[in-house]
């Protein structure tokens, strides 16, 4: 039975001697926690003597995560690849310094995936890839190939080429062919009126009903009908209309 200071209650479900929580937070003085604390201090002193800081600045961490987002990795996908939750990535991105173990996780993630463009297997995955890439592009975040591995952690280093945040194009007049193709594939990106009309016209060629087109691109069936009328698209024969997925 772990011995604890009488004024502090150490939760019984804690794993004594396996981390620093019981010792540092609850003041546990059981043999296991004291042994762990002793080993940790010995390791920490060795790290300091070797010139290896325990906390790492996050400049390079930010750059690696953003570069992976630029080629299509969503924040959730990155968290899954790290075996962590999405809020964990959020916390890393908000920090000015992280533990070396955390930095090592991001470094391994970047080394393993910086040259691999993600490919979605489902509509949801494809949509996530498209959103991540387009958001990163709008922010002007450079891709992995823009960074030199030797200088990516240097705060004074710059990516190759001139990368600046793109000015947001007025949404109502935006025409992004990539967004249209993503919509036709069923990924449901956010479409401007121009992009939505083009996607509806392409799907009209499949003889789909207004309801099916609306479900496919994420809008109201009445919107599909209005767009078809405005574009003067040929009326579909009800017998030829395809309504089932």
Image: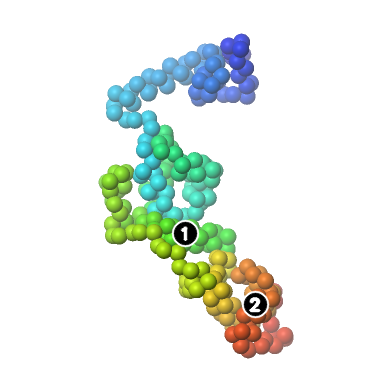
Give the residue drawn at x 38%, y 19%.
42
Sequence-earlier tag: 2 or 1 = 1
Q: Which mark is residue 98?
A: none
Viewer-nearest residue: 231 or 3: 231
Viewer-nearest residue: 123 or 182: 182
Instruction: Assess disc 1: are there few (<14), some (14-19) or many (≥20) residues with their C-alpha within 10 Å of its C-alpha.
Output: some
Helix or strand or loop: what does disc 1 sit on? helix
Measuring from the top left, give residue 134's x and y in whole percent.
46, 62
Q: Quadrant of residue 201?
A: bottom right
Which residue is disc 2 drawn over? 224
Measuring from the top left, give residue 86's x and y in whole percent.
54, 45
Image position of 69 with respect to 154: above or below = below
Give the residue drawn at x 49%, y 54%.
74
Give the residue drawn at x 41%, y 38%.
96
Helix or strand or loop: what does disc 2 sit on? helix
Q: CA distance from mark 2 to mark 1?
A: 27 Å
Image position of 86 with respect to 40: above or below = below
Left or right? Give the position of 189 relative to 152.
right
Give the residue drawn at x 57%, y 77%.
197
Is residue 107 visible in the rendered image? The answer is: no
Which quarter of the rendering shows the N terminus? top right
Which residue is disc 1 drawn over? 135
């Amino acid at each position: 039975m772990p011995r604890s200071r009488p004024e502090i209650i150490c939760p019984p479900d804690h794993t004594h001697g396996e981390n620093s929580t019981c010792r540092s937070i609850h003041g546990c003085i059981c043999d296991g926690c004291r042994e762990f604390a002793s080993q940790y201090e010995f390791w920490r002193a060795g790290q300091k003597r070797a010139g290896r800081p325990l906390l790492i600045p996050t400049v390079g961490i930010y750059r690696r995560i953003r570069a992976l987002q630029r080629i299509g990795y969503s924040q959730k996908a990155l968290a899954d690849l790290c075996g962590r939750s999405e809020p964990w990535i959020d916390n890393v991105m908000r920090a000015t310094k992280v533990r070396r173990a955390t930095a090592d996780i991001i470094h391994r993630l970047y080394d393993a995936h910086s040259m691999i463009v993600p490919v979605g297997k489902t509509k949801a995955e494809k949509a996530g890839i498209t959103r991540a890439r387009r958001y990163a592009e709008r922010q002007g975040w450079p891709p992995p190939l823009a960074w030199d591995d030797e200088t990516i952690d240097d705060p004074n280093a710059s990516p190759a080429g001139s990368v600046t945040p793109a000015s947001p194009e007025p949404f109502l007049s935006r025409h992004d062919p990539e967004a249209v193709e993503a919509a036709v594939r069923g990924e449901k990106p956010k479409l401007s009126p121009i992009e939505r009309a083009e996607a509806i016209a392409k799907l009209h060629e499949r003889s789909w009903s207004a309801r099916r087109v609306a479900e496919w691109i994420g809008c109201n069936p009445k919107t599909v009908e209005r767009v078809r009328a405005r574009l003067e698209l040929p009326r579909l024969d009800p017998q030829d209309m395809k309504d089932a997925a």
